[in-house]
Amino acid sequence: MSKIFELFGYPLDRWCDEAQENCRQAHCPFMNAECDGGGNRYLSGINLKIRKDLRTYFPGKKSVQSGVCSLQLTPDEQPWIVCPRRLLSLKQEKTHYQSATVAKLVAVSNLQEQSSYRVWSEVKMKVAQDGEDGESKSFDYTFDYVLAGSTPKPLSEVASLIGKTKSQTQKIAEANGYTLAQRDGECWIENFPADPITIIEVMTSSTSGGNKDKRTQIAMAFEDAVKNGDNHNAPGINYRQVWARMVSQLIVKSQVGMAWGGRTIWILQDLLANYISKSTALNLEKYASDHPDEVNILAFGYGKKMLTDEHKGKPIELTDNRFYAGPVSETGQDGAGFIDIVKIGSVPPKQCLWLSLFHKKPSVVLHT
């Protein structure tokens, strides 16, 4: 039965006083801030005004997010990360527990080209424009993180770019922390966004819906783990949903990064990377690399740390990593490349279909 492996960043099987105090604060050690539910589980928040039985565990708080970082499906197997903050958070300054992740990210990207970058999180873009065929095309995506350099730009030029007056543009710049300076009688924005561009996408596993009666829904599992420690049940992993979400964006966001003269890097857990290789025609090991390309995947894992006393009950830093990079599509007749992620890994024999149908009652008989 699935169990919560990490609660607010700490392994639940080696709970200690430090972990308990961290839990009381609902603190995420990977963000160095209060847990926000990972950006994808906000509906699993707990209202402590209603849940009187949980108030003692979170003194002074009115609500708390379900701080589940990872799930372990079977004992002694690597857990599945279900919270993107657990894998990588760039919403605040990097923490000790993600320093190795950020260092590897810098090493395989163009982030070495400047001494500092600003980071924007959850950047939404909805743009409609004419395509090459003259028909209207739309781009409607959200980037997890966009990293960019900076350059001085006259305020008047920025005002023209965004279609606002100079006074309106100045207010926007000031509200968003940009530096303004006067030179030769003209106002400049000293650190307007500029090349180089790096898009970071973080993809973690989804949980199955869970069973209310068996208390395997994520919020219920969280409540039981807080009160009873390891004596709880948790939901499973929805592998197909994860793959579907990723495959719908991988090529598009990688192509956008290239079109902008930058690159896109996908951050995954190694378990998810392995699942993609096994379930599609894309063999990631074929694209193991030290250098970025059109499509880039950086996969991290726990390695053997979770099976040893090395972490001693503290948050585990993910240091095991593999980098995969290659073209969207190779030139040549077979067109191999990362486009293979949309192709089937293997076609099951038709006999398997007959067996599946035989073991299931038809829903209806159609008469023509």
Image: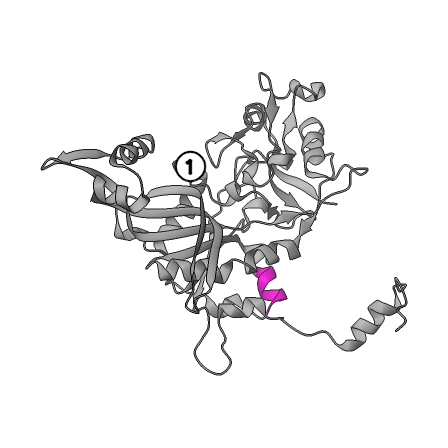
- The residue nearer to you, when weighing 10 against 267, is 267
**Residue 134 at x, y = what percent?**
43, 66
Tell me if residue 130 comes above or below residue 220 in the rendering: below
Q: Give the quarter of the image for residue 260.
A: bottom left
Magenta span of residues: 274-280
Tell me if residue 119 comes above or below residue 283 in the rendering: above
For residue 278: magenta? yes
Residue in the picture at 25% in, 41% down: 191
Q: Which residue is mark 1?
A: 95
Question: Is 359 placed left or right of 312 in the picture?
Answer: right
Colouring style: one colour
**Residue 200 at x, y = what percent?**
43, 50
**Residue 267 at x, y = what percent?**
48, 52
Tell me if residue 177 comes above or below residue 291 in the rendering: above
Q: Secondary structure at mark 1?
A: loop
Question: Is 122 placed left or right of 51 in the picture?
Answer: left
Residue 298 seen: no
- The residue nearer to you, when weighing 53 against 253, is 253
| Residue type at the position of mark 1 | Thr
Residue 220 seen: yes
- The residue nearer to you, when weighing 2 against 254, is 254
Quarter of the rendering occupied by the C terminus: bottom right
For residue 344: magenta? no
**Residue 34 at x, y = what percent?**
51, 29
